[in-house]
Amino acid sequence: MIPIQNMYLMLCYAWDKLDSLKDIKTGGLEVDNLENLLCLMLADGVASLLKRGLHSEYVERTDDMSTLRGRVEPGESIQRMLFERGMARCTYDDLSENILYNQIIKTTLGNFVHCHSVDAKLRTRLLKFQPKLASISSIVIDHNVLNRARKLCPTGIYAFILEVCRLAFDHLVPEPGGVGYRAIDYFRDEKKMWRVFQDFVFNYFRIEAKHYKVTSSHIKWDTPPNIDAYLLPRMRTDVTLVSDTRHIILDTKYTAELFKKYFKKSSLRSEHLYQILTYVEQQAGPNVISGRPVPEGILLYPAASHHIDVSYQIKGRNLRIATIDLTKSWEQIKGTLNALVA
């Protein structure tokens, strides 16, 4: 199990929100599961928002009014005989806190309140925010709503809190019968944790490895120019690090099964090796033509039952397979990552 302190810092890197560390104090992270961590992050974030004032935007409203405001809707006013009563149907812009960002935050806060595994003290803290959010509507959250909020490009603390809400949406599921929520075991979901792990590693190197240009690059198949390669699978690296002297293609994997057994013999997973070797081999040709360094490959796994760091040269290509122990101290984690590209 990844310690909560490490998970918190990994999320800050994965979301590219290190600047939010000054706003999200998390009270020493005295929590024991992911839902309580998210609650703590949400509580600190909402407290910071309320202190600054919730973001407001102009929202179009339509009401029956005795005082004219905005644009009069004559058709509806006549149809409903409002003029005879000294009123009119008006459409106007009103500055409101009841906007999508705030609706997602309030709904997520309410979901955590009704999650049975949330710490009682944290639940009480979340409940205290509800009167201050009374003017904001709760909504049904789905991936479309979350994607729409992300496209609106929130910044600062709002962007961080919306990432918390996005992870909470994946982490909480309704209880049978529709009363309350329960948390799934997020750490055992390899697909979701791989995404966090990949984004963490990518942004760690992008922020900390200053002597490299860090990208997620597209590798083209080394085919003759007259060949239509549209049916060949797309090759995109998890992390590519390029300097004057090195070109590293780093592929992240998140799996508890680092080895496969064949007739009682353990070996590295062939599909992972074939993938990284293909990336390196296909990148080699363009690098030779452009005079760039010979590409090398790194396969990086989170440590589970085994810890390895081995290097091979295959067809003249350097390949390294290594693990990183995410249960160690943060300084040890940083040291392992730094050593990979030193």
Image: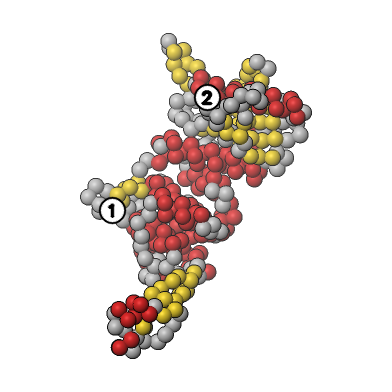
Percent x, y for residue 144?
42, 51
Q: Nearer the viewer, residue 164 or 333?
A: 164
Residue 126: assigned label: none
* Mark 1 burial class by Cα count in 10 Å: few <14, some 14-19, many 20+: some
Determine whether, in the image, residue 96 is placed left or right of residue 309.
Answer: left
Q: Nearer the viewer, residue 158 or 68?
A: 68
- Secondary structure beneath label 2: helix
Q: Is residue 254 visible?
A: yes
- Secondary structure beneath label 1: loop
In the image, residue 301 above or below residue 41:
above
Determine whether, in the image, residue 50 is placed left or right of residue 141.
Answer: right
Location of the N terminus by quadrant is top left
Determine whether, in the image, residue 226 is placed left or right of residue 85.
Answer: right
Q: CA distance from mark 2 to mark 1?
A: 41 Å
Per the image, the residue denoted by label 1 is 180
Tell me which residue sits at (35%, 56%) in the image: 140
Q: Are marks 2 and 1 in contact (CB under 8 Å)?
A: no
Tell me which residue sits at (64%, 45%) in the image: 207
**Which quadrant would residue 240 be assigned to in this image?**
top right
Percent x, y for residue 116?
30, 51
In the image, residue 336 above or below residue 79:
above
Percent x, y for residue 139?
36, 60
Tell me which residue sits at (29%, 83%) in the image: 81
In the image, residue 282 above or below residue 8:
above
Per the image, the residue denoted by label 2 is 272
